[in-house]
Amino acid sequence: MNEGKKLLTMLLIMAMVVCFIGCGKKEPQITGKWVCDDGKEYFDLYSDGSGVIVNTNTESEDYLKTLPLTWIAEGERFKVNVDFGSMGASSVSFAYALTDTTLTLIYDDGTEKKYIKEK
C-alpha cells in the first residue's frame, strides 16, 4: 500500500508541474491585425507566413491600397517581402519589439513605427 501512495503522490506532483507549465506566461503572438498608430495603414499577418498590407491613405493609387506579402520573424529581425504585382517585389528587414498589444518596427537608422494589435 505504501508503494501505491508513493506512486500516486508522484503522479499528482507531475500533473501539477504540467499544469503550472501550461499556465505560465505565453509569448506574444505576431500573427493578427496590426494597425499603424498614425492610422494610415494596417497589415494582417497569418500563421502560414503570408499576409496583406492595406494602405488607408485616400491619396494612394488604387493598385497600392491592398498588397500581398510574405513575412518571417527570425531572431531579432522581422523580414517582409511585399508583392507589387507587375512592378515586382520589395523586401525589407527591421529590428522589432513585440508585446501582446504593440509591434514596433525599428528601421536601421533608428526610426520607429508603432502598430497596435486589433482584437
Image (cartoon, rainbow, N blue to C red):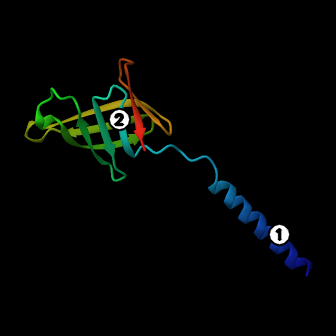
Q: What label sits on residue 108 in the rendered view?
A: none
Q: Position of residue 80 (x, y in %)?
A: 29, 38
On screen, residue 115 above or below 119: above
68, above or below 93, in the image: below
Q: Quadrant of residue 64?
A: top left
Q: In which quadrant of the rendered view does residue 11 lie?
A: bottom right
- Disc 1 secondary structure class: helix
Closest to the observer, 8 or 64: 64
Q: Percent position (x, y) of residue 27? A: 53, 45
State the SS at label 2: strand
> Residue at the spot x=21%, y=29% of the render?
57
Where's residue 99, x and y in %?
50, 36
Q: Residue at x 69, y 55 (%)?
A: 20
Quadrant where the C terminus lies?
Answer: top left
Above or below residue 81? Residue 12 is below
Q: Disc 1 to disc 2, how far (Cα)?
A: 50 Å
Three-letter amino acid code at the position of disc 2 = Val
1 displayed left or right of 84: right
| The disc label shown at residue 35, or none | 2
89 or 103, which lies in front?
A: 103
Instruction: Tell whether 17 sits left or right of 28.
Output: right
The residue carrying pointer 1 sits among few (fewer than 14), some (14 to 19) or many (20 or more) residues within 10 Å by Cα, namely few
Farthest residue to the left: give it.
Answer: 86
> Mark 1 or mark 2, which is nearer to you?
2
Which residue position holds label 1? 9
Mark 1 or mark 2: name the one nearer the start of the chain: 1
- Residue 10 % position (x, y): 80, 68
**Count the marks: how many?**
2
Residue at image location 64% in from the left, 50% down from the top: 24
104 or 59: nearer the viewer: 59
Q: Amino acid at mark 1?
A: Thr
Q: Quadrant of the N terminus?
A: bottom right
